[in-house]
Image: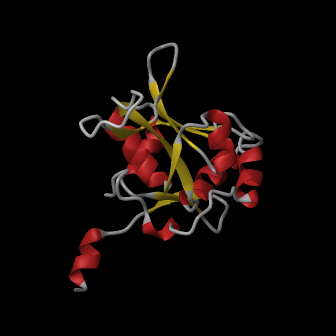
Amino acid sequence: MRTLGQPNAAFAGDRGEPDPALRAILARAYDGEQNYPRAVAALCTARLLLPIVAEGDEGGDAPDPDRHAEMAAVLVRSAAGDTAVPVFTGLDALTSWNPKARPVPCTLDDVAATAIQTGSMAVLIDLPGPHPLVIERGLIDELAQGRRLVELPDGGFGWMFRDPDAETAGS
């Protein structure tokens, strides 16, 4: 598994622009029974932006070699005390939410793993809009294992995953 310090190299040239097709799918996510899983399936193959911010001692007026700050994933806390991981489909949504946050390009399974590691109960997609979406813990557990939700030819949905034993058997 990658960490925040090791972003996905597949997104090296990414400029953070939103995918209009993905946002169109998200716009319909809550209209009709099949559109929510279709939106999650689309997110499984999308580049997402996880916001990170500096934590720790970064204040002061003058440079200080002993002072440092750690970068950490941002969490959102509900009134009930539950935490959620915000993630964004484009730099525009991320910066409208928090202009000081830095984007880390990642995949939904990376975000789900972060949610598990932080004890978060949800992943919040594009919190300020244009089309927010919530993924709750049951789906997060599946996604964190590297599984992807896929649309099947009959219009249903299923989980796709790699068999690590099959990969090692061929080597």
Q: Position of residue 91 (x, y in %)?
A: 64, 49
The one nearer the camera, 169 or 113, is 113
Indicate the quadrant containing the C terminus: top left, top right, bottom left or bottom right.
bottom left
Of all residues, the one furthest to the top in this rendering is: 79
Coloration mode: secondary structure
Q: Residue at x 56, y 69 (%)?
A: 13
Residue 121, by quadrant, is top left
Left or right of 45? Residue 153 is right
Whether residue 112 is visible here, answered yes or no, is: yes
Residue 1, by quadrant, is bottom left
Q: Residue at x 65, y 65 (%)?
A: 154
Q: Position of residue 136 (x, y in %)?
A: 50, 35
Q: Residue at x 44, y 26 (%)?
A: 83
Q: In the image, is residue 165 above or below residue 158?
A: below
The one nearer the camera, 57 or 43, is 57
Residue 27, by quadrant, is top right
Whether residue 141 is visible here, answered yes or no, is: no
